[in-house]
Image (cartoon, grey):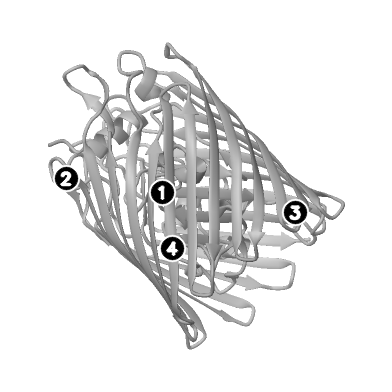
Amino acid sequence: MKNIFRSSIAVACALSTPWAIAQSPNNDIDEIVVSAKGEQSLKDILTTTHVFTEVDIEAAQVKSIPALLERIAGISVSDSGGRGSATGVFIRGVSSSQTIVLIDGVRVGSATLGAAALNAYPIEAIERIEVLKGPFSGIYGADAVGGVIQLFTKKGGADASSISVSAGSDGLSEAGVGLSIGDERNSLYVSAQHEETDGIDRTSIVSGGNQDKDAFEETAFSLGGKLSFGENTTALLNVLATQSTVEFDNLFGNGEGNLTDNETLSTALNVTHSFSDSLTWSTTVGMNEDKAETTSSFPSTFETNRDSLSTELEFKLSDSATLTSGLDYYEEDITSTNDFPTTNRDNKAIFAQLQTGSEKVDFVASVRSDDNSAYGSETNGSLAMGYKYSDSLRVTVSYGTAFVAPSFNFLYFPFFGNPDILPEESKNLEMSLLGNYGHTNWRLSAYQTDVENLFSFDPDTFLAANVGEAQLKGIEAEINTKLLDWQIGLQADVLDAQDKQSGDQLDDRPERSLSINANRSFGNLTMAFDVRSETGRVDRGGTKVAGYGLFDISASYKFSDKLSVLANIDNVFDKDYTLNLATSTERFNTEGRQAKLSVRYAF
């Protein structure tokens, strides 16, 4: 039987743990994880959480946000031929459209595709990334089946100004400048980045002029700031705008002159006020724009405009109990060259979360009710409990429900959309063991996610429909340790992702993945090595894709407190591998050996 998840993706794209395993020794497990609500510290969160700090992001020397996220156990990435191409990020086998993406608390992404293009946002503008795995519709509503990915932009402060230039393989050139003033209470940050590359030939198709290189160019601007009013009120502002041009191959015709211009704009204003030590109020006003204009044999334009408002109160009921409650509203409008019969919808929601604990036991419960003008009402929630067996061993268990909102394409696309289609719904169960001994931290997690009412295509009506069910089961393991002055991390996962009706493996999800990273400083020189491999990936309804292993190396040298030189080589052994098939006989190409040299000056 045809793979249901693959059908959904093809149509749409036509397109835990009480503390996270540290991504680097710079992580502080006592820091607050904003995405978890209720001022939960990293060591107290009961669902699997990963945090990349600014230090982690700079040290990783990766080209994009998806390239950084795939270093986490249980996250896989599938692109469509190199830098700038359509990229899917899968959390525990759950696709991009089933994972919510936030920028400074504001929902972002395309309402027609139903997903956010994480590769569209410049990693240079990001100060922090939080990844929460599991069902979070009990807090965030639609699309939080796989979890939450939240990006936090830079807000500035003392000694945060810098200028950088880079050059690399395939004609890569980058330049960026960030200007910062202020201190911990009041700050302003303004930055601009530009990147361009000749790129690679995105597909193996050589007919019709498709054998040429497909270029990518992006310019980004960000503005961030913090303003404190007295001791109790803080305002945070961010603006992140990007414009990019991506050349691509035509899978069924002439490949010359095909390109897509993408524009994104995310704006957020957050005001937080502490009435007392036990009561805090926070409100975020946001705006997101996402536009894609394609020039090809079949030109098209798809634009999303989303305005949002969320407000919440945090009550500290006691030293060990916190109640967070709030209201959430957003309105989505689309504009397209296609004649959608409906171009607007809104969503109203109310939610609450209670967290409490003792010396041995911790407990978190959440519930949220959504009312959407397009598809009706949904109520979801979650429960999580942690038990501290000893100072070095803890167990957590969680259960939750979540849902995915049907995109405008599934609801209203001409001659395909079905206004009666229902949201996808999921149930998730997870259990984790966590331990620490000396310099070693480890986590072992097992999970199962069942999804029903999957979006797909009904061949009887030629319309979108809820067809089929899927089950995703897996085990993740993470170990971080220090050995002979090397900081070493190991991440491994095994995934069984099946169409429950046919028993077929779902496309684009590797069955087994392994990554090992190691870094060490030698005075002013820091070296890092990364090895990652996967096997058991299928595509296009069950076609097997060969496994692979990649080796990356990076180094940075500080000539002074202000001047640094960074270098990295990805895919050192120039491995030829495949992530994604373009047709039954052709594939999307992947990048071979890639080298980059950067110079950064801080002032």
Residue with the mark numbered 4? 385
Lower position in the chain sequence, tag 3 or tag 4: 3
Lower position in the chain sequence, tag 2 or tag 4: 4
Who's the residue at 33% across and 43% down the image?
Answer: 426
Residue 423 location in percent, x, y? Answer: 36, 31
Who's the residue at 49% across and 40% down the image?
Answer: 368
Looking at the rendered structure, which numbered label has been put on residue 543? 2
**How much space separates mark 2 and mark 1, taking CA atoms?**
30 Å
Foreground mark, 1 or 3?
1
Disc 2 is placed on an element classified as strand
Who's the residue at 76% across and 51% down the image?
Answer: 274
Q: Is residue 414 left or right of residue 244?
A: left
Lower position in the chain sequence, tag 2 or tag 1: 1
Lower position in the chain sequence, tag 2 or tag 3: 3
Residue 189 location in percent, x, y? Answer: 75, 49
- The part of the image, by quadrant, that contains residue 460 is top left
Lower position in the chain sequence, tag 4 or tag 1: 1
Residue with the mark numbered 1? 135
